[in-house]
Image: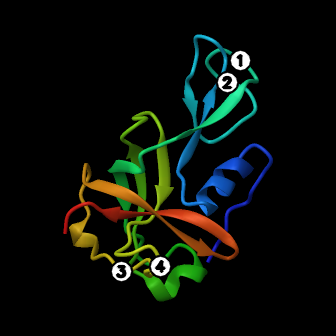
């Protein structure tokens, strides 16, 4: 499996994920409060360097998805066909996180039949440890 590259700006995201929390960086400047992802030092809206991490509900919807055939990366060949999704967060519709829809937090990437995926399908976050990093994955809300 590929593991994320953790930089200084994104480190808190991964620390919260390890605690089972989905948090998104937000501007902490008075009057702004804009959420931003991926994390970065400066707010693109007001240019403030003040930031905080807001707890999200962990709910969202599939905004887009693909099912690679054949697998694009050799490390994933054994799990094909698998899905790669963009999830639009319910709490922050302009924020979209990449991931995979799985049957359970520790289930393999091919654990959900691709025919069950739909744009707009409700999902909730689940966390699993892989390669020493806890990553968010997504579980379908129904069925």
Q: Which mark is residue 47?
A: 1
**Sequence-earlier tag: 3 or 2:** 2
**Sequence-earlier tag: 2 or 4:** 2
Check the image and report above or below for 40 versus 17: above
- Judge left or right: residue 91 versus residue 127: left
x, y percentage for residue 6? 74, 56
User: As drawn, which residue projects farthest toward the front?
Assistant: 19
**Sequence-earlier tag: 4 or 3:** 4
Evaluate if marks 3 and 1 touch, with contact meaning CB atoms under 8 Å apart. Answer: no
Mark 4 to mark 3 CA distance (whole Å): 10 Å
Residue at x 47%, y 79% (from the top left corner): 106
Q: For mark 4, what is the residue?
A: 106
Evaluate if marks 2 and 1 touch, with contact meaning CB atoms under 8 Å apart. Answer: yes
Check the image and report above or below for 31 versus 92: above
* SS of the residue under disc 4: loop
Residue at x 66%, y 56% (from the top left corner): 14
Q: For mark 2, what is the residue?
A: 43
Question: Which class describes the residues within 10 Å of circle 1: few (<14), some (14-19), or many (20+)?
Answer: few
* SS of the residue under disc 1: loop
Evaluate if marks 3 and 2 touch, with contact meaning CB atoms under 8 Å apart. Answer: no
- Judge left or right: residue 64 versus residue 118: right
Of marks 1 and 4, the one in the foreground: 4
Question: Which class describes the residues within 10 Å of circle 2: few (<14), some (14-19), or many (20+)?
Answer: many
- Judge left or right: residue 119 versus residue 12: left
x, y percentage for residue 77? 51, 84
Of marks 4 and 3, the one in the foreground: 4
Evaluate if marks 1 and 4 touch, with contact meaning CB atoms under 8 Å apart. Answer: no
Quadrant the C terminus occupies: bottom left
x, y percentage for residue 117? 26, 63
Which residue is nearer to you in this view: 45 or 81? 45
Residue at x 67%, y 62% (from the top left corner): 4
Mark 3 to mark 1 CA distance (whole Å): 42 Å
């Amino acid at each position: 499996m590929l593991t994320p590259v953790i930089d200084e700006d994104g480190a808190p995201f991964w620390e919260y994920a390890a605690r089972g929390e989905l948090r998104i960086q937000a501007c902490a400047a008075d009057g702004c409060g804009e959420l931003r992802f991926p994390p970065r030092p400066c707010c693109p809206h007001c240019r403030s360097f003040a930031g905080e991490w807001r707890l999200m509900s962990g709910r969202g919807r599939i905004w887009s998805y693909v099912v690679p055939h054949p697998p694009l990366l050799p490390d994933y060949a054994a799990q094909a066909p698998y899905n790669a999704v963009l999830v639009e967060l319910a709490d922050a519709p302009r924020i979209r996180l990449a991931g995979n829809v799985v049957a359970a937090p520790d289930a393999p990437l091919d654990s959900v039949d691709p025919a069950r995926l739909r744009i707009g399908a409700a999902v909730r976050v689940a966390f699993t440890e892989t390669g020493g990093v806890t990553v968010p994955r997504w579980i379908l809300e129904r069925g």
